[in-house]
Structures are given as structure tokens and as C-alpha cells.
Image (spheres, rainbow, N blue to C red):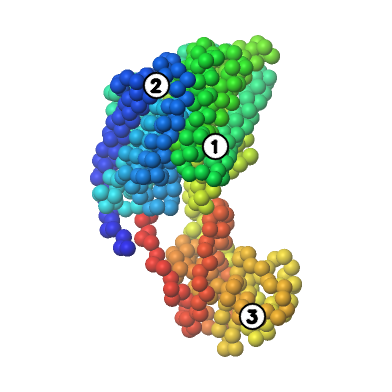
Amino acid sequence: MARPRTIERSSLILSLLAVGVGIAAGYGAGAFRALIGLFHNLAFAGQFSFAYDANQHTAASPWGPWIIAVPMIGALIVTWLVKTFAPEAKGHGVPEVIDAIYYKGGIIRPVVAATKAVASSISIATGGAVGREGPIIQIGSALGSTVGQLALLREWQRNTLIASGAAAGITATFNAPLGGVLFAIEIILPETSGRTLIPVLLSTGSAAFVGQSLFGTNPSFNIPALGNDGLVLNSPQLLVTYVIFGVLLGLAAWLFTRSIYWFEEGFEKLPVNDYVRHVAGMGIVGVMMYLFMIYGGHYYVEGVGYATIQNILEDVLTNPWLLLLLFGAKLLSTSLTLGSGASGGVFSPALYLGATLGGAFAVAMQHVAPGFHLDVATMAVLGMAGVVAGSTGAALTALVIIFEMTRDYHVIIPMVIIVSIAYGVRQFLMADTIYTFKLTRRNHPVPGSLETNLFMLRKASDFYDPRVVRVGSTRGMAEVRRRFRRFGRQHPNVLVLDAEQNIQAIFSSRRHYRLKGRGGIGIRSWVDEHMETDYIVVGAEDMIFDIVGRLRAANCEVALVTADGNMTHPREVQGVLTLSDVARSSRLARQMERRRKPRPTLKPNRGDKTQSAPRAEPVAEDDA
């Protein structure tokens, strides 16, 4: 199938398109909230109305105990929508956006935006314990990708519009433009430069204008004045307290991340179809909702949970045992909702978990160390930042969004400490975030960081492996084993030569091959299983940037290094350089090396300086 023609649009056109994406995402956030309100009022009250304030608790439904069936009915509809129109709409959305950037060339199908909007609004409105931020991020990203495809943009420009849509969604939802920009930088953008940041900034500003015109200028939560006495680090004991709290939040972030995928794996193992899985999971959530209404007066775990967070921030909820119960209940309900197949985000549940844990910790500290003056609202705010940063990996985003919510500078210093520790604890326990873990399980790893590739300007002589031995193919396995014993565990690069002293095969030291123990095995079967027959010849002074380009063009992984880039005899080979050597030098994820599929064994074209595989697939267009 031929690839569509793409065009390198000017910076002005890209910026104008980003503004359009920001405006569309802002109104998309408004439409998404309206859908949630409509479906919620229909499901819980049987009323046709778009009016819905997520910061207020839902009134007791006239359905009584039949409210348990509402999440189950919603599960049937959501499963049908996802299976019929867009499987990408299942889950919390952001991993699919990242996957589209790194593995699909920035292509997100237009139907994803519509399906995600309807499916997620039904999941949230009927009681699913998920958030609305992840869906609006995916909706905005889908809008950006669609615009990029219609405008025939190059891949990097499509990715920029995807990030612009994601940032616009965050901005419109939280009224936090700086947080939206940082989210795009930390999570979405594969390239951070002037040409990508300017469109993201313009999109964010446009979305902020639309969002404030629709929702007002207030942030998502009405946070009262924080107790500044507890925010001033005036004693070592208070610093230790914050460190302990950061460790607890890091553990909570790890548990939150793991729990969702534990439940997902558990539901996938059930010998039933997707409809039964999701209905069963939401049936349990419905029971939890009903029990909380009977014994606690509110549904508590349903929907985005903003009303419960607002109660904690206003010191309405201060019972530590109830707060810990709500923490466990929200963790369970969110895991059941997403694990069984819902469509919704994880940002709001992370805020909920942080607020409940922070409130409980504050009440406990009021009894243990009343002199610290740690109030519930302060610790809830810090808890929200810690769990969000730890679970999502977006530490700067969490810091800035919470600051934009509180507008209290005093909260910054303790928040920096707590967020850093929570992030470090989660990273110590597991490398993946709640966004990347899903991709790792799919064998789609993504870089953990963006770095300046200065190593690409270095020379081959700085990287190549000089351990080279030459073995004639007629000597067989005994000679090869003898050479290997000389080097012990440090396997050399083996050049297998034929009778005319032509290189028949290469076995690089980086290759994880296993020698057969049977003495009767012949060199041919061994070569067929482990050999690299395609290679290029490079000079010791050649730059890594040029070598990688030549390896890509030749569709091979091995470069033989000589003094001047010419080779008339194998004795001239000074060392071997592989793509694995380059990857290790750049600290790229080792999983990416394991992802390489073995190429078919092919005879090299003798006498040619560049030995490329005849059946090489065409190299994709380089959009960088």
C-alpha cells in the first residue's frame, strides 16, 4: 500500500492549525462535560438535563437498590461502542496516544475522538470510577492527528498537533495552561524544540480562552487558604515528616499502577466474553456505590470523585478511618472499572487517592505531633501532587497544576520534596509509569527520557569493539569453541571466512547466541541460525551519525571498521560496530534491542563494499 504524500508545511501554517486544534479541544471539553451531565442525569435521576456539577455529591437516586444495575447497563453500552467502532477507546487513553506517536507515525483514526467521547462519558456518568482528563487528552490528540492527516503534514508536525491537542485538553479541564504545556513536554512530545513548543503554547492559550469562557476562571477545586505554619520547613522533624509522607505516596502510586493491570490481567483470564467481564466488574462497583449511600450518605466512589475531594479540602471529611476506607474503595473501584474494560482516565482517581491518604495522614499527625500544625487541606493538596507525579511520571506537571489550583507559593517547597520522593519510590519499585506499563506489556517500549544525541557526532573509533577473530569455515565448530575459550565470558566478534578469504558470516559479541553442545553439528547449520551476513565497511574516523544512516539504508546492523573505510582483506578489520553498541551509548531502552526480529539468512554480495540484504524492506520516510 503506497504511503500518502506529505508536505513540510511552514511554521506559520502549523501554528495556525495548532490554534484551531486548541479551540476545537476547548469546545470538545465543553461538549464532553455536557455529555457526562446528560447521561448522568438520565442514569441516576431519569431527567433530561445537561446541568451537572462534579464538585457536588449526587443525590440519592429514586431507583433505590436498582442503582446497582446502572453501571452494568453502562458497561454493556460502552463495550459495544468500543468493540464496534474503536478498540483504542478502551482504557485510560494516554497510552494509546503515546503508542500512536512512537509506533503509528502519528496516525489516530478520526472515529476515536467521537467514540472516546461517548464511551467515556457513559462510563463516568453511570458510575465508573474513572476520570475525565484522560479521555479529553485522547479526544484532543485525535483531533490534532486528524487535522494533521487532512493537511498532509509530515510526521513530526502531526505529532506536534497531537501534543497540542493533549495540552489543550488538560488546559481546558483544569484551567491550568502551564500544566497543560508541561504535560505535553513530559509525556507526549518526542521532540522538544522551538518548532514544536510554539504550536503547543498557541494551542494551550486558545484552549484556556475557550475553557474560561465556558467554565469560568476558577480551577477545578475551590481550595481554601492553606495552613502556612505547616508549609514552612522550620525544623528537621517536619522535614522528616514530609519525607515519610512522600514514601507513603510513592507506595500508593506504585500500588495504584500495579492494581489496574493486575485486575486487567485477571479479567482477561476469565473464560467469558468482553460483555460479561465488564458487566461483572461494574456490578461490583454498583454494589459498592449502593452500600456507601446506605451507610455513608453518598455514593463516594462513583464518577470522577471531585465531590469527595472537595469535602476533604473543606475539612468536611476528617475521620481518618473513613478516609482510609475511601482510599481502599476508590483503588478497588477504579481497578475494577478499568480492569474490566471501561473507558476513562486515571488522573482524577490519582487525585482522589492522594487527597484521602493526605487527609488521613494529617489527622494522624495532629495526634502525634500537634506542634507541626498540619491541616487536612494542606496534606490533601500535597498528597494529590505526590500520587499524580508518582503514578504518571509527570512530576513537573503535577507540581504546576496543583500550584495553579492553590495559587499559594508556600506550598511549592514541601511539594517539591514530596513529589520528588514519591516519584523516586515508584521508580525504584517499577520503571514504568501508569501510562507506559501498558505499552511495555504490549512490547511497545518508549524512551524514558529525551536527550541531546551528542554521541552521534563522535567517531567510530570511540565505539567499536576491537575483539575480532577470524575463523575459516572449513575448521568447523572445534576451532570456534577453542577461540571462545580463550576469551572466556568476553565473547569476541567472529568473522567466518571461506576458502577465498571472503567474509561468509559475522557473529557480533553483542549477539545473544547459544552454541550447540552436540559435537556433530556442522558449521553451516550454526551459521544459518546465528550469523549476520549483511554488513557495511566504515572508516575509524567516520561519524556515528553517518554510520547509522548507512546502516538504515542497507537494512543491516553490523559495520566493519577499517582504517580508511576500504577493505581488500579481512585482516584490515580493526573492529566491529553494531546498532546495539550505538543504542547502549545513547542509553536507549534495552527492550528496544530485544524487539528486533531476526532477518532471513542471506548470502552476501561478494566484492561489494556495502553488503546489503537483497530482500530488505524499504526504509520509511525520515520525517525528522
The part of the image, by quadrant, that contains residue 255 is top right
Question: Which residue is located at x 48 percent, y 84 percent?
Answer: 607
Left or right relative to 38: residue 501:
right
Residue extending farthest bottom = 500
Q: Where residue 65 sits in the image (x, y, percent)?
A: 47, 20
Q: Residue 44 — which label? A: 2
Query: What's the residue type where badge 1 is placed?
Result: Ile
Upstream in sequence: badge 3 or badge 1:
1
How far, Cα to Cα, is label 3 from label 2? 73 Å
Q: Is residue 38 above or below residue 91?
A: above
Upstream in sequence: badge 1 or badge 2:
2
Left or right relative to 123: residue 531:
right
Left or right relative to 256: residue 206:
left
Q: Is residue 573 above or below residue 1?
A: below
The part of the image, by quadrant, that contains residue 433 is top right
The part of the image, by quadrant, that contains residue 460 is bottom right
Task: Read off the residue under disc 1.
Answer: 260
How far, Cα to Cα, is label 1 from label 2? 26 Å
Task: Read off the residue under disc 3.
Answer: 523
Q: Where residue 364 sits in the image (x, y, percent)?
A: 65, 16
How far, Cα to Cα, is label 3 from label 1? 50 Å
Depth check: 468 or 29 in front?
29
Secondary structure found at label 3: helix
Question: Few, some or many C-alpha atoms within 10 Å of disc 3 (few <14, some 14-19, many ≥20)?
Answer: some
Depth check: 360 or 87 in front?
87
Does any portion of residue 307 appear in the rendered image?
yes
Q: Are marks 3 and 2 in contact (CB under 8 Å)?
A: no
Check the picture and name the quadrant holding the C terminus.
bottom left
